[in-house]
Amino acid sequence: MVETAREIAAALGDELVSFDLDDIERHGYSDWSSSNSSGRPVAVVYPKTTDDVSRVAVICSRHDVPIVPFGAGSSIEGSFSSPYSGVVIDFAHMDKVIAFHPDDMDVVVQPGMNWVDLNRTMEEEGLFLPLDPSPTATVGGMVSTNCSGTNAFRYGTMKDWVINVTAVLADGRIIKTRRRPRKTSAGYNLTSLFVGAEGTLGIITEITLKLAVVPKETGVAVVSFPTIADAASAATKVIRSGIQVAAMELMDDTQMRIVNRHGSEAVRKTKWDETATLFLKFSGPTKEGIQGDISRVRELMVPHSPTKYFFARNKREEADLWAARKEALWTMTSIKPEGHAIWSTDVAVPISRLAEVIELSKKDGEKLGLFTSVVGHVGDGNFHEALMYDPKNHLHKAAVKEVVNRMMGRALEMEGTVSGEHAIGMGKIQCLMDELGDDTVEAMRLVKQALDPKWLLNPGKVFELPEGSSAVAADRA
Amino acid sequence: MVETAREIAAALGDELVSFDLDDIERHGYSDWSSSNSSGRPVAVVYPKTTDDVSRVAVICSRHDVPIVPFGAGSSIEGSFSSPYSGVVIDFAHMDKVIAFHPDDMDVVVQPGMNWVDLNRTMEEEGLFLPLDPSPTATVGGMVSTNCSGTNAFRYGTMKDWVINVTAVLADGRIIKTRRRPRKTSAGYNLTSLFVGAEGTLGIITEITLKLAVVPKETGVAVVSFPTIADAASAATKVIRSGIQVAAMELMDDTQMRIVNRHGSEAVRKTKWDETATLFLKFSGPTKEGIQGDISRVRELMVPHSPTKYFFARNKREEADLWAARKEALWTMTSIKPEGHAIWSTDVAVPISRLAEVIELSKKDGEKLGLFTSVVGHVGDGNFHEALMYDPKNHLHKAAVKEVVNRMMGRALEMEGTVSGEHAIGMGKIQCLMDELGDDTVEAMRLVKQALDPKWLLNPGKVFELPEGSSAVAADRA
């Protein structure tokens, strides 16, 4: 494989291929991921153009060498691991806006572009990509995992914002799935097929994104409830009212306790109830509209025994209230004992089952005597559970894995999915089989086989490799 | 092939298979379609269950007989024609709601269900499927063409409302693309792959649909402008303001003239300006919100030289104003001379190019001296042009075809699509090649080949059949 990487270096230029061991390690392992492999790439390629990527694919295809695309490296399911070695393609140099069309409300970007940076460049035109994943995420990774975040209830998930992708197929051919219409019914929806495929069908090198209008006015409210069930039923009432809240997030008692004690100063100055709490964001073109929405939501909450309301009176208060939600992840990380790990995962279920699945999963985790906390995207029936444990303690680790498995099983019993927004990676391959059954997964494999007959693109993700496939088997953790 | 159909009748029951010639004709030809084939099915099968469909597929697959799914028969691109004969599957008996889950805001239906009927059954719960195609359309056809209509600007297209489909594959295997979560990133998006595939990848036998909350309050406004360019730039202003109008439709001078003269009594009592006219629908949870939106829109229109405003003051006026838009199709049909045909087609382009593509296409049609009219879904950059002609006059027909081809070419030059909401059928196969190029269409064909290796599912749609494929070649118009 190293010879293949050398051939790539000769073709693209030595400065675009790294054999540095630290670089390789950084692209092969992540502390954030609950699924790591012992496999490592032989090199990291830093292409500058779609043609560079195509040349890499041609060379790798000739020598049966796996190709693993790499974005921000923030996957928690091992989507960028290299269990069969090969070369990693890092899009660090392909991080530009190629064309911005404010009048058409779209933008063409390279996969290495960070979404926060992208939104900053479009601020003046009052347009944005209304997704909200980790601030480190790159557009390529967001596309490949069909990410979402707190804005999904209002704006949908990544698949709803991709107009077309340019992808390099396994043999080096370059295809563009669409031109630039906002709507089409011409031929198969290859765009949506590539979104969420984790780079296993093609390597995405360019993306045209739909944009939304940045709302002129915003509002934030935080409401606490005695139980998760109360919070969920209040949320359902809001959803069914047709009031279009911009986001509706749930944090559990554990999360609220951490925020009270370990949040930033701005967050700690509010005395939060340490119970199930809903965070609501409002947005729209007029102040009156938002005021109307807020007072309507307040009325709707009353029958659900709210224990405390906070309504922001100005931009500053909005930021301070919402910060409590935004800090959920880092406050948790900040209290993690040295050497401990966080197993974070998510599922989504039909909305009516959300409270039940959360309460059961939470109890199950707490029974272990481990730190267990929950944040949920209530409007989508999606929630994250985080479990803190000592990875060197094998009993602990096995117990956490078992809790996670039971959470997956429970979501499936409720007709849900094993991954609401983090894709399958290596960690949930068996879960995907459990979710959809052999025949449906077989249909997916047929599509994979048709577009990548040698199984060279990001092998070992989404599915196990078929017997006898070309990718060289490496040790697997 | 007739023997195969007899075998199906023996398996399913004689009463579920029709060999009646009128029935066959009705399933093989349509006056509404600009693409008809001289091929006819040998029989029409009326399955009652997914298992029935699976049995049909097993039998057809064994004998290499094509299967063509049939919904309402309202395709205008020949999506349900039988150019290679075979059997048609008509879902008339599979027209039921299987499960309605108001708390999860979804519904499971059979493909033969009419969407207007479906929405009526859900009225009491205040939920609806927010698409708006022809009132005759069935959910199966809507899914298979990725339909939309006047509500797409606010609510998106069919692909945005399908949670999962159950599909019978070419060999009879039954797959379900998802369970019932509103959001997922687990595995490939087979759901979106089947939406818009025109029954060429699998026969859809069950669909789970997301539902939206019926807005409590509505409003309607109609505004006329000197030119299409003025109307389009006013529309763009509204779009960029972030005001979420429920629909924004454009009708040209010709359409307005017809409506003035041939509309229903309720419509004719308004004296419409016979110029480019925008029809706007507003909807939301509160009266105040809608009033605010309407006055804001009025302000935004001022710089674009509006010549006449109509704002509905009550429900009755709303219905009367909107009726002018709704009657566009039938008023045109009503003035069509005996024996004449209407060639209706659509394209979509990036929004900023809409006025230009409409004006050029309209002029091009008018140069023929033929009746040419335009209605547009402005918010999506999508418009329909209708040309009236005498199909027995071959020169006329060829000229109309040429105008349509130029309209497609123009849309592609502007980075648009050759089909905004009517799919490819038989009529736009070459256009699809022009739109996406050989390599992209080849990727689609690889997917087709993987899932239907004998090319038996709705052959001759989306693509030409490959040389030497099993489906028996029949005469082609």
Image (cartoon, coloured by chain):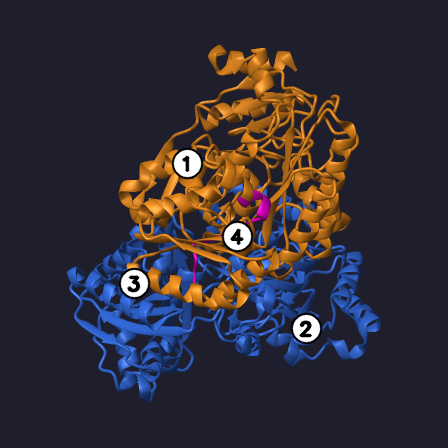
Chain colours: A blue, B orange
Residue B459 is covered by the magenta coloring: no
Residue corresponding to mark 1? B265
Q: Earlier in the sequence, mark 4 or mark 1?
A: 1
- The answer to whether any part of residue A180 appears in the image is no
Residue corresponding to mark 2? A94
Residue corresponding to mark 3? B288
For the record, the magenta segment spans B243-256
Q: Which type of secondary structure does the marked residue at label 4 adopt? A: strand
Give whichever of A384, B77 is nearer the camera. Answer: B77
Q: Which type of secondary structure does the marked residue at label 1 adopt? A: helix
Neighbourhood count class around disc 2 (C-alpha, 10 Å): few under 14, some 14–19, many 20 upward? many
Measured in 3D between alpha carbons, the distance from the residue under mark 2 to the one under mark 1, in whole angstroms, is 61 Å
Amino acid under disc 3? Glu
Q: Earlier in the sequence, mark 1 or mark 3?
A: 1
Measured in 3D between alpha carbons, the distance from the residue under mark 4 to the one under mark 3, in whole angstroms, is 26 Å
Residue B472: % across, % down: 73, 22
Q: Left or right? Give the position of A184 relative to B292.
A: right
Q: Earlier in the sequence, mark 4 or mark 3?
A: 4
